[in-house]
Image (cartoon, grey):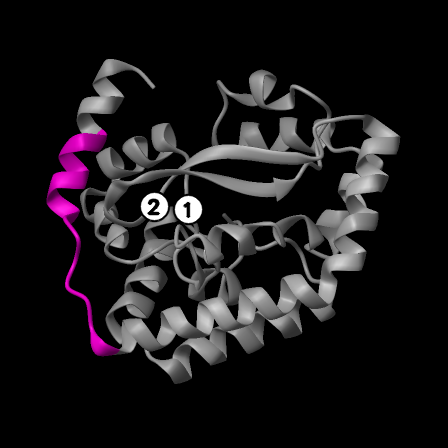
Amino acid sequence: MSEQADAALEQFIALAGEGEPRPVDAVLRGLDILISAAILLVLSPLLVLTAAAIALTSGRPVFYHGARVGRAGQLFRMYKFRTLKPDAEERLGPYLGEELSRRTELEVTRVGRALRKVHLDEVPQLWNVLCGEMAVVGPRPVRPAFFTELCQEIPQYWQRLVVRPGVTGFAQTGMTREESWADKLAHDMEYIADRSVSLYLSVLLATVVKVLGRGPAAPS
């Protein structure tokens, strides 16, 4: 990031602080650990085969990892199965929004396209959940530079830092890519304000239904 972006991000981190934890947060964290560990265990044979397919068809690395803004502004590396051609991140780095989406489609590998169709590329993020960097349900994490840009456009955007980012989220189950970032933020803030075990399970169930229905990829 540039020095200007670094300074802006530090400002938003200071505003977000650690948030105000609620008793339900400990319960939701327990569910995160239980669900992510169970899924990784059950899917482990398929994950090994997926890693082998990526390595054999497009080489290494098998995993993509990129910097994302987490709870209270802490940066972390988010993991996914690599679905793009090698070094695609460097070529896509300067782009955002619709142009990024268009160019990304040109970089997707054959195996990557199949993984994206069933959302299997997202499963390694459950390791981020076990490490405490993400939650199963929460606002989707964004890249640091993009986060700074969104905070400049939408002053309230930093408020989503009060919880861990999620593998899936309230906005992802009920919105499309065409929705504005402000509308997505409104859904994220609704989840943060009303977060409960019942809402967590409701979002999780909606995600399962969407994945089994092989709907379009959830918006970031």
Q: Is residue 195 something that shows in the picture?
A: no
Left or right position of 51 against 148: right
Estimate the x, y position of residue 170 in percent, counting from the top left. 43, 66
Estimate the x, y position of residue 93 in percent, counting from the top left. 51, 21
Q: Secondary structure at mark 2?
A: loop
Left or right position of 107 against 52: left
Q: Verify whether residue 85 appears in magenta.
A: no
User: Which of disc 2 and disc 1 is earlier in sequence?
Assistant: 2
Packing grade of label 1 (10 A; few <14, some 14-19, many >=20) is many
In the rendered image, which quarter contains the N terminus? top left
Left or right position of 10 against 166: left
Which circle marks residue 70 in the picture?
A: 2
Mark 1 to mark 2 CA distance (whole Å)? 7 Å
For the residue marked with disc 2, what is the amino acid?
Gly
Depicted 124 relative to depicted 56: above or below: below
- Mark 2 and mark 1 in contact (Cβ < 8 Å)? yes
Pointer 1: what residue?
141
Q: Nearer the viewer, mark 1 or mark 2?
A: 2
The residue under the point 49% across, 41% down is 78
For the residue marked with disc 1, what is the amino acid?
Pro
The residue under the point 65% across, 19% down is 87
